[in-house]
Structures are given as structure tokens and as C-alpha cells.
Image (spheres, rainbow, N blue to C red):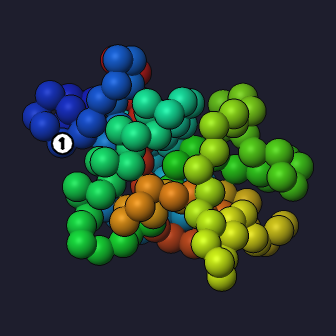
Amino acid sequence: DQRKGYSKGWGRRTQTKCFLIFKHFETYDIAQKLCEARGGHLAMPADDTELTVLRRYLYDAFQPYNWPSWVGIHDRRSEGLWLFENGQRVSVFDWYRDHLVTQPNGGTRENCVSLSSDDGKWWDNDCERRMYYICEYRL
């Protein structure tokens, strides 16, 4: 059972969730199916505490490199309406912004969200892009 990975020190947890990074390159949809097959779903950071846990986990797992990883957020239903994989609206955002690039910037071509491992910021990406992914399990 992948959820036991946390007890072996593989993941990070909050009061109610355990997050596990999978270092396999998958599309968004395949990553979601693999998380479901393991009893969870793509990570859905619902508040600042969960975002902080995910940021630190990604940074610790990949420093000094940047490996973006899928989380369970998309705007496939309606452009700009960001939803969690369970259909709930996202209320806490952490998009990447600097003087050259502002996310989200992909319009209807980029509908799925990844977190950067170097700074934990959000990027919209083509859902068919293959990247690492983070599953979430209820404790």
C-alpha cells in the first residue's frame, strides 16, 4: 500500500493528508489515474499550510534542481476557473510572477497546474506534458 510510504519516511504530511512524490514522467491524466489506483488522487493543496508543506517537500526532494510536478488543479471546464480534481474551486493561489513571465499564461493550450520544485510556484502547462507528480492520501 503506497500510503504506508509516509510511515517509511517517503512523504510529508499535514494533520489530515499525506503527500508522496512519484518520480515517473506521466501526463496529467495518467498521473491522476495512477494516484487513484494507489488509493489517492493528485495533490490538492487547499490552504497555505498545505502549500508550505508541498513547497518544502518538493524543494528537499529535488534541490538544487527544478523538477516541476503535477498537482490536481486544472481549468479544463472553463478558462480561468481553476478547480481541484474533485470539482471544488481553488481559493488559494501561488502563481509564478516576475518581470518577464506571469503565470498562468497558456490560455486554452495550458490547462493543468504543476509546482516548481525550486520555489514551489505554480505554472500552467499542457496537460499532455509528461512530468513527475504528487499524490495525496487521507490519513
Q: Is residue 83 left or right of residue 7?
A: right
Q: In the rendering, at what x and y percent does residue 109 appear?
A: 78, 71
Q: In the rendering, at what x and y percent does residue 16 appear?
A: 39, 18
Q: SS class of the residue under badge 1? A: loop
Judge the density around disc 1: few (<14), some (14-19), many (≥20) Cα neighbours within 10 Å.
some
* Residue found at the very far right of the displayed protein: 78
Q: In the rendering, at what x and y percent does residue 55 appear?
A: 38, 49
Residue in the image at 29% along x and 74% along y: 65
* Residue found at the very far front of the displayed protein: 99
Q: Quadrant of the C terminus?
A: top left
Q: Is residue 58 left or right of residue 129?
A: left
- Residue 9 visible? The answer is yes
Q: Nearer the viewer, residue 10 or 106?
A: 106
Instruction: Determine whether 2 is above or below 33 in the image.
Output: above
* Residue found at the very far bottom of the displayed protein: 100
- Numbered-mark total: 1
Instruction: Determine whether 101 is above or below 63 in the image.
Output: below
Q: Quadrant of the N terminus?
A: top left
Q: Which residue is mark 1?
A: 10
Q: Nearer the viewer, residue 11 or 41?
A: 11
Quadrant housing residue 64: bottom left
Q: Is residue 139 left or right of residue 106?
A: left
Residue in the image at 13% along x and 37% along y: 9
Amino acid type, callout 1 = Trp
Q: Nearer the viewer, residue 25 or 51?
A: 51
Residue in the image at 50% along x and 42% along y: 42
Residue in the image at 44% along x and 33% along y: 50
- Residue 128 visible? The answer is no
Q: In the rendering, at what x and y percent does residue 79 appear?
A: 87, 55
